[in-house]
Image (cartoon, grey):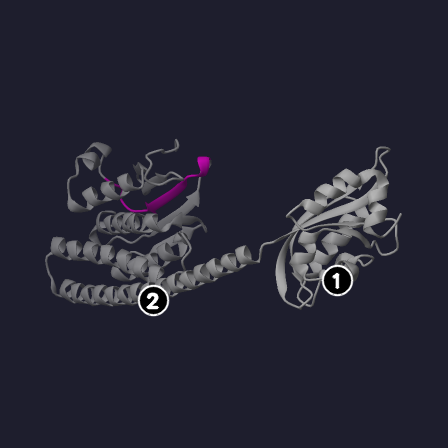
Amino acid sequence: MTTDRDGIRGTGWHAYVRALEASAVPIVIADPHAADMPLVFVNSAFLALTGYGEHEVLGRNCRFLQGPKTAEADRHSIAQGLVNRVAISLEILNYKKDGSAFWNELHMAPMYDEAGGLEFFVASQIDITERKVRQQALQQALDQHTEALRLQAEETRHLAHEMTHRVRNSLSLVQSMLRLQASSLQEQSAREAIVSAMGRIEAVIEIQRTIESADDAPDARIADTLGALCAKLTQISPVPVQSQLEDVSVTRAMMMPMALIVSELVTNAQKHGFPDGRTGEITVGLAPVAGGAIQLSVQDNGVGIPKKSELDAAQGFGMKMLRGQIRQLGGALRVESGAMGSLFCVTIPVEAGTGKVPAP
């Protein structure tokens, strides 16, 4: 093998070489059989691109185009392509004779003779510096815009947390006023109405507390909220409220209706399940069930509830709200009652609000 243009013309590739010489695309040919794989051909477009003279590059390995900021990974890719005799394409930072850097879209491939033997490696170079500069400018603009959006979202989140905090404080004040008013009332029905209102407000407060302390995740742990709600409902009524809550995740949109359902069922059990100062307890349960659904339950050991027909016919505000929240979740209500108390089970589908309710 030779290491000059006349030598490569003598290999039988003369027509191919003439085409490469006339090409506007910078092209080089390297000899894989000579020590350090030197260049044996470069066309005029390559010399114009790099600023070198032909005598300065022939006989040298093409790595002279690499420089201080050429990525090590790109150097390794080229070396592996040569060792494995495979074609490679990559964008690599190279340097001209004057030291200026340019982005090179490099395409390199082995060339074989008629017998299948490796003869040369041929590589083309395309200066894509302007394209890379535009890409970097676009990326910088995108990064700046993204950062501006992040700061705006952070400010919006801060304002939302502040508003949530203020709403929660206001609701707590309203609840305190209702508690004070309930303590001065003599009529049982009026006291019960205020206690029910306090339970609903407490449900909203706990949801607000969760929103205030939560991150931006789309899901939330409802068990923590319902546990805190049960503790507060125990303080409102002499009938204690226990909880058996498994750690399940729900969407934030599901939290408010689920909390209101628990509040309504618990206050209803406190009001009707334990007449004449009767003692007992209420248990709130939360667990996954078959089909990926969630089952929310409120069970008491009181005197039980009216017949189902009477329950269905109930048109009070509390029952209307309960049905509305269950409907919003696409859930189904099951009621059991007997001498040992009552049980309310609400089965909520995986995709709350779709109306697709698994069989209980």
* Other-residue count near label 1 (Cα within 10 Å), few / some / many at <14 / 14–19 / ≥20: few
Q: Residue 297 colored magenta?
A: yes
329 to the left or right of 147: left
333 to the left or right of 53: left
Seen at 84% across and 33% down, the residue is 114
Residue that badge 1 annotates: 64
In the rendered image of this protein, does residue 136 appear above or below residue 41?
below
Residue that badge 2 annotates: 155
Seen at 19% across and 42% down, the residue is 320
Quarter of the picture holding the C terminus: top left
Label 2 sits on what residue type?
Glu
Could you say which is closer to the camera, residue 267 or residue 95? 95
Could you say which is closer to the camera, residue 199 or residue 349? 349
70 to the left or right of 207: right
Q: In x, y percent, where is residue 9?
A: 82, 44
Q: In x, y percent, where is residue 46?
A: 69, 54
**Label 1 or label 2, whichever comes before in sequence order:** 1
The residue stretch that appears in magenta: 291-305
In the rendered image of this protein, does residue 306 appear above or below residue 298?
above
Q: Is residue 238 visible?
A: no
Q: Residue 169 colored magenta?
A: no
Could you say which is closer to the camera, residue 170 or residue 243? 170
